[in-house]
Amino acid sequence: MDKLIVLLAIGFISVSALPYDPVIRKLGDGPRYQYMPGPDGSLHLVDLWGKVSDVAEAARYNPDRQNVYHLYTRNNPTVSQPLLIGSEGLLGITNYNANRRTIVLIHGWLDSVTADFNTVLVPAFLQAEDVNVIVVDWSAGAGTINYFTAVENTLTSGQSVARFITWLNSATGAVPSMYHLVGHSLGGHQVGIVGRNVGGQIAYITGLDPAFPAWNTNDNRFRPSDGVYTEVIHTNVGFLGYMATLADVDFYPNGGSGMPGCDSNDCDHARCYHYMAESLTRGGFTGRRCLSYLTAITGNCNLLGSLRMGGLVPKTGQSGVFYLETNSSPPFSRG
């Protein structure tokens, strides 16, 4: 009996010595563990239940210090010039011009300044118009394999980018009506967070297939009121991309999933920024009006009215849900 008591005591001490890391929040009502593809298509098993350690990891991310802002213009289309919040001296030796429109690009999970999202859209914007393109590298917050932490960091990074824009406007006299924010996946929600923290005054905000996992019940997700005109392009609904409407105008190319020429969710998820790039340089994507996103997903859209998807100019005052079909390879537009 004494031996049994000793063994039980040792077992209790061993269990008590294990680190206690309680779950404090669940991101959504789905399965706790899900496979998520990274930018290279490789799958990662992620935990959508947030623990104390996850919050502690997120707290170590300081976007005011760690976010990096890369400026591209027609004078430096391939090699960026750094911008630092609060550094007017550095700003003064760059090619930034407050009289031009400013495009702000925000990448997604496990990505960085070198993301395909940026390498596709930077040259497209510079070809289409003489603009300032600012690429936000928030890889210090997005680069963690811990998806819960990356979701938490999406909020804090968005608040920090809003502070950067507010400083830039104060330093140069630029105004929110001269901005177009474009974000992909987690960045697709982050652009909304930026916009609402600039008072909803940004002229044009585009969410490119904003992320679905962990965002269905997340109050920080993209909202129609985040900018003067908001638009979302859905290309992988219900998997990596958000299914329901989020913006003033929501486009569902090919019903929002199964993009022609794609054979994976990852490819579908990336198609949105290729469509956006082509809309800047060629136009041609014309959607027909749908009763709801459910009819858009099935392609059963016969209401009067059409609208061009993407493009340089905000379609201020427009609203609704639209469906269109694309080609399987460039040019993707059929118009």
Image: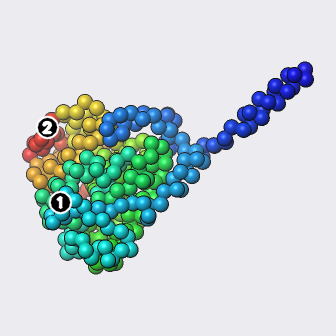
Amino acid type shown at disc 2:
Ser
The residue shown at (15%, 64%) is: 74
Q: Which residue is mark 2?
A: 329
Judge whether 122 appears above or below 9 on screen: below
Residue drawn at 54 percent across, 41 percent down: 49
Point out residue 168 in the picture as x, y percentages from the top left corner.
33, 73
Residue at figure coordinates x 44%, y 64% from the top left: 65
Decide which of 21, 300 is in the foreground and name it: 21
Q: For mark 2, give the secondary structure.
A: loop
Q: Is residue 108 visible?
A: yes
According to the image, label 1 marks what residue?
77
User: Please, which residue is most extreme toward the right here?
Assistant: 2
Q: Position of residue 119 (x, y in %)?
A: 22, 50
| Residue 125 sits in quarter | bottom left
Residue shown at 25% from the left, 46% from the top:
116
Q: CA distance from mark 1 to mark 2?
A: 26 Å
Type of the residue with mark 1: Pro
Check the picture and name the quadrant holding the N terminus.
Answer: top right
Residue 228 appearing in the image: no
